[in-house]
Amino acid sequence: MNQAKHIAIIMDGNGRWAELQGKKRVKGHEAGAKVVKEITTYCSNNPEIERLTLYAFSTENWKRPRLEVEFLMKLLNTYLKNELAVYLQNNVRFEPIGDIRAFSKTLRETISMVQEKTAHCDGLVQSLALNYGSQDELLRAINSLKDSEEDITAQMLSNELDCKHDVDLLIRTGGDHRLSNYLLWQSAYAELFFVDTLWPDFKAGDLEKIIVDFTGIERRFGGLK
Ligand code: FPP
């Protein structure tokens, strides 16, 4: 039986959720942050799930209006500070992925603080992808290996990536059917689930149903039955 050890989610639809309610887009991000908490808690209570990797800010998201970007940065900072107690309570280790050098000193310090304070937790690993893009991650990894005297192997490359773990189940909410530069190497054999539900409406029960469907899929990893 398949085990969804590593679940990755593209949390899409915050803006449309807010607009549908006549609210500003940022209200959708606020509602989305609450869902991050619900889904993380659900996963931390499911011993089968080892990793949850969430796309929180992409290398392309800088193209959004300045005020929306600033709001997302503040929201991340507040979220991380507020959630520290919840991480500790649920034995969740926080491990960011992405190139956080582009963030403010304040946000970088909060990220490091939560990472350090949860380093001893040995339950679920929750990774937030922050200023993350798969192509950027691969380029950084390739550049770090470019002076290697031996031919680069898949294992060597994988070891240099921010996220070194294959994804079992990749979910995208919000109705679009694309990967948007997310965990492209790690998702080589992931099962992909695209759901129409907008992220702020996504519930732990929706994830549970997807996991049940995932469990029934025959995964062959390029081999035969
Ligand atoms: C996509 O919705 C979502 C994002 C750009 C970022 C995800 C952010 C959150 C879930 C909230 C903050 C997260 C944390 C961890 C505090 P969209 O704005 O592209 O939605 P749209 O497609 O409807 O416009």
Image (cartoon, helix red, strand yellow):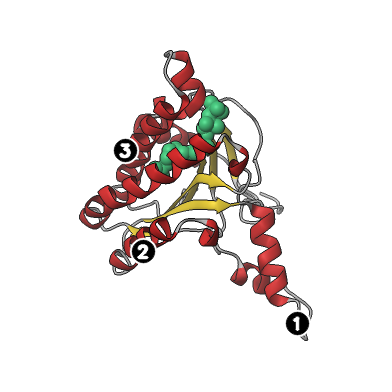
Any mark on residue 38, and which?
3
1 vs 3, front mark: 1
Q: Secondary structure at mark 1?
A: loop
* Lower sequence index among marks 3 and 2: 3
Give the alpha-carbon distance from disc 1 to disc 3, as whole Å. 44 Å
Q: Residue at x 33, y 51 (%)?
A: 80
Q: Badge 3 local density, few (<14 within 10 Å), some, or many (20+)?
A: some
> Which residue type carries mark 2?
Gln
3 vs 2, front mark: 2
Q: How many marks?
A: 3
Q: Residue at x 37, y 33 (%)?
A: 30
Seen from the viewer's position, the closer of residues 106 and 114 is: 106
Any mark on residue 115, and which?
2
* Lower sequence index among marks 1 and 3: 3
| Residue under pointer 1 | 147
Q: Secondary structure at mark 2?
A: helix
Give the alpha-carbon distance from disc 3 to disc 2, as whole Å. 20 Å
Give the alpha-carbon distance from disc 1 to disc 2, as whole Å. 30 Å
Seen from the viewer's position, the closer of residues 147 and 100 is: 100
Q: Position of residue 163 (x, y in %)?
A: 54, 61
Q: Are marks 1 and 2 in contact (CB under 8 Å)?
A: no
Q: Are marks 1 and 3 in contact (CB under 8 Å)?
A: no
Q: Residue at x 39, y 44 (%)?
A: 74
Any mark on residue 27, and which?
none
* Residue farthest toward the front in the current orientation of the protein: 66
Mark yes or no: residue 80 visible: yes
Q: Position of residue 28 (x, y in %)?
A: 42, 27
Q: Badge 1 local density, few (<14 within 10 Å), some, or many (20+)?
A: few
* Lower sequence index among marks 1 and 2: 2
